[in-house]
Image: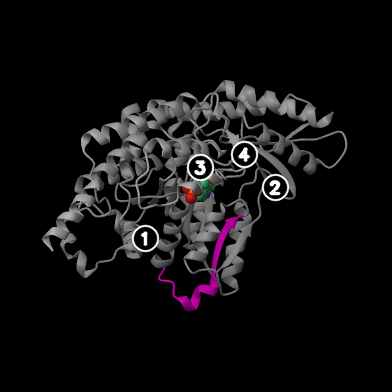
């Protein structure tokens, strides 16, 4: 048996490479990432190639090892040079983020040391760091020190945690699920509906409240609906609002909705996945009035704090309510009980073992300080206003609501023919060009092209290029 163990050990030790090997791999990866970043100003924001990365299948899992250079070549060809490039300054579709470099270093350290950041007892320093970041975000939103939160994988899971916390805090029983009413706008992010379903509440009534011209939820209609539903024996339960809708960046009127929620005893959730971090821009402060009254807030550092994908945030005002929904103790976790100086992430999340997400957020915030974040967010707001102003001056363009954040919507009105069809062709032409990437949406049967200025690398020259490309493509399609 000893011989067998020793033989296995020899092969098993391959999993723990010596420094020489590590240095070599590090240097290859560093070279790869440096080239990727240095070439960003010449690579496209969107590449629609014929095979779309199919050759990655050539590198399926095998018994024998493969050389890193072969793998990096394939990553470059089949992954990093096809589809959307969310690191590119030209990516102005959906709500991107960019991917700050120091986050990669944070991920690297977190992966090397593999701290168990789900439980305080196991990694007290890591949990303190994550909770410190959450307390910073609580302060930013005007929440009391007693509030808690969790670094999630993204905004969708954050919204799920909010809905489950609300469900548990109201002690709602299954027999009442079909009496529940959830209020939201037709502009709510679809992760809300998805979370409702995952939370087992698909029998609940979804009340879509009418919108005003600026695509914001109508407060009067909201209260009317709540009163009507109560009269009909239903249970008004949850209000979802958006601080920055994905489509147009609209901000629902938080303060009056907070008051309605309080008056009628409903859970008040603010989905600020896109817009929340604009609180860092002093001139935006007044728009946030009322957010501090929310029972829960979703933020997404991988959007407006420019992190690489993989970090969202849920903040919950009441610690007791968050724990009621998510805190469990198992026999095999008994050693973990005694130290509770800090709330453990596992007690505020469906996850137990998780990536130590704190480092990828903390490292860039500390290495840069807040100043460049504030500047970059304000720059994005101004770039969007600049785009809106410039395109408004051109003939035959119709614009969506005046941008409150960093999303603008426009469409071209051709002299003849179907307007929606023309704009579909226009966005296809922009996407096929690939230097820049925009996405589109349909609101009340109107096809709009969206410009979302979110990536930290996007600057004035990119917006000027955007205006030039739009004009170019319109001319081509019109002739
Ligand atoms: C992006 C977004 C979400 C979903 O967040 P993910 O991080 O993609 O899971 C939810 N709500 C809004 C308003 C968003 O913009």
Quarter where residue 24 is shown: top left
Residue denoted by label 3: 274
Q: Percent from the top left, x then y, of residue 326?
A: 34, 62
Residue behind label 1 places its C-beta within 8 angstroms of ligand 1: no
Q: Is mark 3 within 8 Å of ligand 1?
A: yes
Residue under the image location 31 percent in, 56 percent down: 319
Q: Are the two marked residues, 3 and 2, in contact with CB atoms closer than 8 angstroms? A: no
- Kindly report the distance in space between the C-alpha atoms of the residues bearing marks 4 and 3: 30 Å
Regarding residue 255, the answer to whether it shows in the image is no
According to the picture, the residue beneath numbered tag 4 turns out to be 49
Residue 350: give its label. 1
Residue segment shown in magenta = 170-185
Q: Position of residue 426 (x, y in %)?
A: 74, 36
Which of pointers 3 and 1 lies earlier in the amino acid sequence?
Answer: 3
Instruction: Count how many numbered circles sit on residues in the image.
Output: 4
User: Please, is residue 214 above or below residue 24 in the view?
Assistant: below
Task: Return the disc, 4 or 2, that comes first in the chain's sequence.
Answer: 4
């Amino acid at each position: 048996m000893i011989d067998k163990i020793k033989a296995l050990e020899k092969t098993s030790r391959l999993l723990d490479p010596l420094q020489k090997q590590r240095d070599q791999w590090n240097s290859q990866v560093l070279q790869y990432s440096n080239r990727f970043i240095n070439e960003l100003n010449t690579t496209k924001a969107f590449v629609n190639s014929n095979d779309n990365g199919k050759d990655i299948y050539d590198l399926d899992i095998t018994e024998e090892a493969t050389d890193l250079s072969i793998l990096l070549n394939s990553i470059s060809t089949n992954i990093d040079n096809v589809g959307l490039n969310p690191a590119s300054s030209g990516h102005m579709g959906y709500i991107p983020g960019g991917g700050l470099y120091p986050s990669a270093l944070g991920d690297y350290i977190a992966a090397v040391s593999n701290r168990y950041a789900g439980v305080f007892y196991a990694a007290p320093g890591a949990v303190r760091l994550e909770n410190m970041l959450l307390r910073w975000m609580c302060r930013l939103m005007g929440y009391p020190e007693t509030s808690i939160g969790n670094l999630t994988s993204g905004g969708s899971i954050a919204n799920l945690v909010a809905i489950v916390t609300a469900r548990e805090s109201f002690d709602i029983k299954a027999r009442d699920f079909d009496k529940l009413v959830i209020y939201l706008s037709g502009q709510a992010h679809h992760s809300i509906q998805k979370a409702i379903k995952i939370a087992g509440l698909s029998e609940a009534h979804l009340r879509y409240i009418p919108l005003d011209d600026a695509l914001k939820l109508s407060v009067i209609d909201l209260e009317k609906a709540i009163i009507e539903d109560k009269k009909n024996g239903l249970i008004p339960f949850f209000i979802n609002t958006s601080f920055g809708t994905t489509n147009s960046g609209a901000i629902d009127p938080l303060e009056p909705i907070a008051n309605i929620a309080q008056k009628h005893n409903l859970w008040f959730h603010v989905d600020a996945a896109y817009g929340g971090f604009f609180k860092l821009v002093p001139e935006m402060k007044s728009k946030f009035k009322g957010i501090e009254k929310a029972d829960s807030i979703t933020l997404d550092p991988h959007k407006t704090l420019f992190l690489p994908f993989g970090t969202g945030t849920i903040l919950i005002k009441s610690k007791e309510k968050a724990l009621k929904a998510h805190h469990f103790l198992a026999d095999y976790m008994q050693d973990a009980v005694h130290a509770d100086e800090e709330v453990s992430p596992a007690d505020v999340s469906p996850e137990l073992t998780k990536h130590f997400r704190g480092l990828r957020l903390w490292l860039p915030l500390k290495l840069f300080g807040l100043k460049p974040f504030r500047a970059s967010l304000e720059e994005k707001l101004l770039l969007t206003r600049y785009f809106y102003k410039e395109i408004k001056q051109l003939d035959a363009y119709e614009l969506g609501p005046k941008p409150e954040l960093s999303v603008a919507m426009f469409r071209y009105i051709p002299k003849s023919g179907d307007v929606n069809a023309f704009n579909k062709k226009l966005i296809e032409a922009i996407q096929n060009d690939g230097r820049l990437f925009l996405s589109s949406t349909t609101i009340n049967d109107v096809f709009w092209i969206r410009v979302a200025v979110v990536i930290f690398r996007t600057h004035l020259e990119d917006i000027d290029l955007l205006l030039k490309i739009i004009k170019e493509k319109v001319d081509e399609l019109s002739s």
